[in-house]
Image (spheres, rainbow, N blue to C red):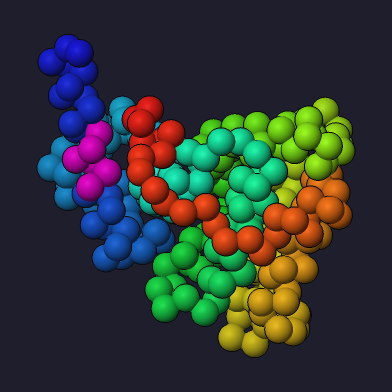
C-alpha cells in the first residue's frame, strides 16, 4: 500500500471521527460539512473529495456502526440456512419495533431522517439502502436459496433481494406507526405483534408453515469463537 493511499485512508478516518463528534453534539440537521471540516482541521473542499455530501458522511457512519455490531457480525458469519434467514428476519423486526421504547432515542431520530429523505431528494435513503443491501443482502439471498433447495421455502419471483427490501419496508412502516407517544395503530401485545409480523414476512418470502413453526422462536445461535465474518476481515 502506497504512502499516498495510507494518507488518504487516514484522512478519511479522521473526517469520520470528526463527523461523529459533530453529529453527536448537534444532530444531523445542526451539523454542516463546514463544521465537520473545521473539526477535522481540513478544508471543506478536501472533505468533499472523500464525501460528496453531509448525507454521504452520515450514511457511512451508520454503515460502520452496523458492521461493528457484534450480534449482526455473528449472524452474517453463520452458514446460510433457513435458520439463519429466520434469525435475520427476527432481528430486523425486533430492532425496529422496539425503537420507541429504547432509552436512546438516536435510532428513532435516524428512522425519522430516513423517512424524511424519501419525501425530499432521497439521497440519504439511497445511500443507506445501498450500504445495507451490500452488508446484509448476500446472507439473505444465500439463506433463502438454501431454504428453497431444502424444500423449506418456495421460490417467489426472480429477484430475491427484492424480498429482502419488501420485508424491510414492511417492518419500517410498522415501526413508524409506533413511534409517536400515542401510537398511530394499536397492535396490542408487543411480543405477540412482533411474532405475527415475523410470520407475515416469512410467509411473504416463501417459507413453508412447517419451516416457520420449526425455526421461529428458537434461541439465536450462540456466539462461540470467531465468525466467518471476523475470519475474513
Rendering quarter of residue 2: top left
Q: Can residue 118 be seen in this view?
A: no
Viewer-proximal residue among 5 and 84: 84
Instruction: Report the side of 99 relative to 86 (left or right).
Output: left
Q: Is residue 23 above or below residue 16?
A: below
- Residue 143 in the image, given as x and y percentages of width and height: 66, 37
Which residue corresponds to the image point at 41% horizontal and 61% vertical from the top-left? 29
Which quadrant is home to the N terminus?
top left
Q: Residue 116 vs residue 53: left or right? A: right
Image coords of residue 148 (percent x, y):
80, 34
Instruction: Estimate the x, y position of residue 208 in percent, counting from the top left.
Output: 85, 49
Q: Which picture quadrant has residue 7?
A: top left
Identified at 35% across, 40% down, the residue is: 226
Quadrant where the C terminus lies? top left
Q: Give the range drawn in magenta.
A: 12-17
The chief SS type of the magenta part is: helix
User: Is residue 198 in the magenta section?
Assistant: no
Amino acid at each position: 500500500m502506497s504512502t499516498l493511499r495510507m494518507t488518504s485512508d487516514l484522512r478519511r478516518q479522521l473526517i469520520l471521527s470528526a463527523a461523529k463528534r459533530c453529529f453527536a453534539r448537534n444532530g444531523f440537521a445542526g451539523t454542516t460539512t463546514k463544521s465537520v471540516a473545521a473539526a477535522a482541521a481540513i478544508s471543506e473542499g478536501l472533505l468533499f473529495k472523500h464525501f460528496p455530501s453531509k448525507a454521504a458522511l452520515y450514511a457511512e457512519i451508520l454503515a460502520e456502526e452496523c458492521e461493528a455490531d457484534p450480534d449482526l457480525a455473528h449472524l452474517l458469519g453463520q452458514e446460510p440456512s433457513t435458520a439463519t434467514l429466520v434469525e435475520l428476519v427476527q432481528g430486523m423486526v425486533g430492532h425496529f419495533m422496539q425503537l420507541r421504547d429504547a432509552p436512546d432515542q438516536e435510532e428513532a431520530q435516524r428512522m425519522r431522517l430516513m423517512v424524511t429523505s424519501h419525501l425530499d431528494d432521497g439521497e440519504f435513503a439511497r445511500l443507506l439502502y445501498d450500504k445495507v443491501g451490500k452488508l446484509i443482502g448476500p446472507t439473505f439471498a444465500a439463506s433463502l436459496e438454501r431454504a428453497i433447495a431444502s424444500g423449506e421455502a418456495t421460490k417467489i419471483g426472480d429477484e430475491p433481494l427484492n424480498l429482502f427490501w419488501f420485508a424491510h419496508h414492511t417492518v419500517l412502516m410498522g415501526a413508524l406507526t409506533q413511534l409517536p407517544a400515542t401510537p398511530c395503530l394499536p397492535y396490542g401485545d408487543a411480543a405477540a405483534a412482533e411474532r405475527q409480523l415475523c410470520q407475515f414476512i416469512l410467509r411473504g418470502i416463501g417459507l413453508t408453515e412447517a419451516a416457520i413453526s420449526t425455526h421461529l422462536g428458537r434461541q439465536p445461535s450462540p456466539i462461540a469463537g470467531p465468525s466467518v465474518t471476523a475470519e475474513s476481515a
